[in-house]
Image (tube, rainbow, N blue to C red):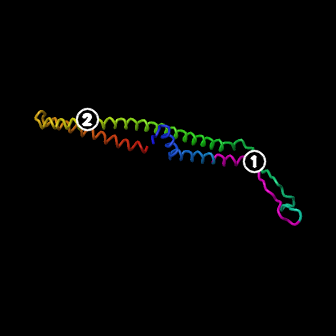
Amino acid sequence: MALTLKRAIELALENSKEIQVAKIQASVADRAAQITKAQFMPNLYAGSGAGYTYGIPETPGGRAPSIFKRVVHGADFQRTAEGPGERNAGAVQSAEDCARRCKEQRYHANGDAYLELGKVRHSLELLRKEQESAEKILQVTQDRQGEGYELPVEVTKAQLTKAQVIQRILQLEGREDELKFF
């Protein structure tokens, strides 16, 4: 199955630990802002004082129970009370920005890795062909040396060339392995 650039980036974004942590931090900051803001908002409590009773239900004060009750806190009318909510809103925005930046960084890093992987695979293909050529050159050089047409130093040069090509192949295979798991 061929892995396209689009699919590679999708997989990276889905499985990125940094993005998951950033999303969780943004969610925590949002919840903290909501909790802080709730302290300064009117509250509505709903309930029923009606239940199984013998006679008319009453509250401990002697009145009939209410179905809805609105409780107003004094902080509702304080203009200075907006400060903590605004600070938490800033923290939420900061956490969301961090998550967005993290996602963009992962997007770019995976795109770069995918493109580099393509280059590495192309280079490996060319180096394998070069290795075949180096082996043929070495064989011809050894044959010519056996017939007396080449000096031993030419065989050594051909062996060195072949070894250098193999070394570059091994380096690129290592890089390919790194990029596969990026």
Q: Name, please, the residue furthest toward the bottom.
A: 54
Residue at disc 2, secondary structure: helix
**Structural distance between the alpha carbons of marks 2 and 1:** 82 Å
In the image, residue 18 sits, relative to residue 58, either above or below, namely above
Count of picture labels: 2
The circle drawn on residue 10 is none
Q: Is residue 169 left or right of residue 42?
A: left
Residue 7 falls within the magenta-colored stretch: no
Crowding around mark 1 (Cα neighbors within 10 Å: few <14, some 14 to 19, many 20+) is: some
Residue at disc 1, secondary structure: loop
The amino acid sitting under disc 2 is Ser
Quadrant in which the C terminus appears: top left
Q: CB under 8 Å between callouts 2 and 1?
A: no
The amino acid sitting under disc 1 is Pro
Q: Name, please, the residue furthest toward the top.
A: 149
Magenta-drawn segment: 32-54
Q: Nearer the viewer, residue 171 or 71?
A: 171
Q: Residue at x 58, y 45 (%)?
A: 26
Residue 145, percent across and down? 13, 36
The residue at which mark 1 appears reads as 42
Is tag 2's residue or tag 1's residue first in the polypeptide sequence? 1
Residue 128, percent across and down? 30, 38
Q: Nearer the viewer, mark 2 or mark 1?
A: 2
Q: Name, please, the residue furthest toward the left.
A: 148
Q: Nearer the viewer, residue 174 or 140?
A: 140
Q: Residue at x 40, y 38 (%)?
A: 117
The residue at which mark 2 appears reads as 133
Residue 110, percent across and down? 46, 39
Crowding around mark 2 (Cα neighbors within 10 Å: few <14, some 14 to 19, many 20+) is: few
Q: Residue at x 55, y 39 (%)?
A: 100
